Image: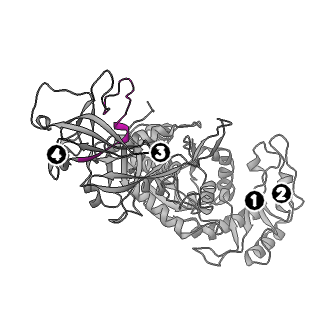
Amino acid sequence: MSETNFIHTIIEKDLENHKYETGEIITRFPPEPNGYLHIGHAKSICLNFTTAAKYGGSCNLRYDDTNPVKEDMEYINSIEEDVRWLGFKWNERLWASDYFDTMYEGAVELIKKGKAYVCQLTPEEIKEYRGTLTEPGKESPYRNRPIEENLKLFEEMKEGKYQDGEMVLRAKIDMSSPNINMRDPIIYRIAHATHHNTGDKWCIYPMYDFAHPIEDAIEGITHSICTLEFEDHRPLYDWVLREIGFWEKPPQQIEFARLNLTNTVMSKRFLKKLVDDGIVDGWDDPRMPTIAGIRRRGYTPEAIRKFCEEIGVSKSNSMVDIAQLEHFVRDDLKERVESRNVIFNPIKVIVTNYPEGQSEVCQVENNPQVPEMGTRELTFSRELWIDGEDFMEVPAKKYFRLFPPQEDKAGNEVRFKGAYFLTCQAVVKNEDGTIKEIHCTYDPETKSGLGFEGRKVKGTIHFVDANNCVPIKIRKFGYLMVPSAEDPDKMVGNTDSLTEEICYAEPSLKEAKAGERFQFFRHGYFNAEPKLFNEDNLVFNEIVGLKSSWK
């Protein structure tokens, strides 16, 4: 990120004032390994890693693994794959659980200072005692336990003498604080669960708001960059570090607005439910806004990084149109992928004046915008397939593709890209009235590349040779969430988020590699489905269409 944002302004002022002895800026990306990362996390990843790089510093990958009940190694592996795919390399891979001893010492220090106490209220009672946004809370009857009793009970909690939920350790701050996060928050709870990293060493675990500042301080993080929902938690972040007092120069927390995209769910809990309920076929389903999902769909890391840079960093929440993200994907692909002819909703064309049993080779560009990509060969014969949208029996106004003779005009002539000019002469139908085939004639003097002059047509369409093509399966994706028909301000699940159809393609697509991207001429960008594609199962995902409504 070359442009300066408000976070960079803070950092530059700190550097100017020599706030840090080494002058090195250290950031971190701290995911909780309880699900797959989504596109919103990509903004945080880009911001933390590029900010550190801009100032010659470093960025750690740190797992906030303080809740053993929800964490899994599957999520950890996916997080690391996502960060690497986006193009970043962490300085150190760290675990919050490695600091459990220090966190415990910090909690004991607070108890000794009279700043924490063991509370035996039930979760429901704690919630009731907390008060509301307009009414102060009331103090727990256990708030003024003697320090020695608190130390003894906390030690017994650690030794496993009590059941889950039987008691907690709370910070002693201010039950009348206008900031509800400061009303004696819980900082330790009992959880008899095996931890992936520490095993059964612990049966008490720190809460996130207590663990997070300590993790940052231990690692020497200079700027703890968080999303805006943690702004109200910053006083607690500062309180924990100040009251424990182990660190002379504690980190500072800075908040920025998280990414919100139209038609997109940004909740790991909701995304997990989609997976668990079988609405999607996994965390990497191409409809999912997870980084794994958009990677499988065919998005590029370059497009994601450019998108995150373009939307910038602000202090106020806003909604970004998903069409803007699609714009950057489209813009990144247009000059890097080759084009292929694929026919949707196919209609057969018989070239009646072309010799039966004969075919010839045509040359077409791989990417008209990048001549250096060269050309490829297609065959042209008497029987061809064209897109259903390239024929209209009764043409609409300004329709320049194929249509048969009308009362007041002859059949239309169009250019078959890379081949000849063809004129529609007739349409042949089945008994049920559906189109069986259309009959055309070709002009042998108009083959592409021959340099003919004086002949112009308004329509150009693509084709594949009916005798030299392969059927492929196309998967198209709608948004998982769409506006309700009854209430446009309400979002509901989209029951038509996945459609599949069989199309005809030029035979070169049989040689594609899983994950390889193409532009399907006049249709959009597609990739060979990374998990399903093989020579016997030619499945392609739609990445993004050719046109964008975003300006």
Q: Is residue 118 visible?
A: yes
Q: How far, Cα to Cα, is label 1 from label 2?
A: 9 Å
Segment colored magenta: 383-402
Q: CA distance from mark 3 to mark 4?
A: 64 Å
Residue 100, compared with residue 210, is above or below; it is: below
Q: Would residue 133 be found to the left or right of residue 20 on screen?
A: right
- Which secondary structure class fits the magenta region best? loop
Whether pointer 3 and pointer 1 mark residues with C-beta atoms closer than 8 Å, the reply is no
Crowd tier of the residue under label 4, counting other residues whose Cα lies within 10 Å: few below 14, some 14–19, many 20 or above: some
Earlier sequence position, callout 1 versus callout 2: 2
Q: Quadrant of residue 123?
A: bottom right
Residue at the image point whose x is 68% and y is 74% from the top: 193
Q: Are marks 1 and 2 in contact (CB under 8 Å)?
A: yes
The residue pinned by badge 4 equals 363
Residue projecting furthest to the right: 141
User: Residue beneath label 1, please?
Assistant: 186
Q: Residues within 10 Å of mark 3 (few under 14, many from 20)?
A: few
Q: CA distance from mark 1 to mark 4?
A: 71 Å
Distance Cα–Cα, label 4 vs label 2: 75 Å
The x, y position of residue 525, in whole percent, is 36, 46
Q: Secondary structure at mark 3?
A: loop
Q: Position of residue 7 (x, y in %)?
A: 50, 41
The outermost residue toward the front is: 431
Q: Earlier in the sequence, mark 3 or mark 2?
A: 3
Q: Nearer the viewer, residue 84 or 531?
A: 531
Tag 1 or tag 3, which sits nearer the N-term?
3
For residue 18, which numbered disc appears in the image?
A: 3
Q: From what the image shows, is residue 142 above or below residue 367?
A: below
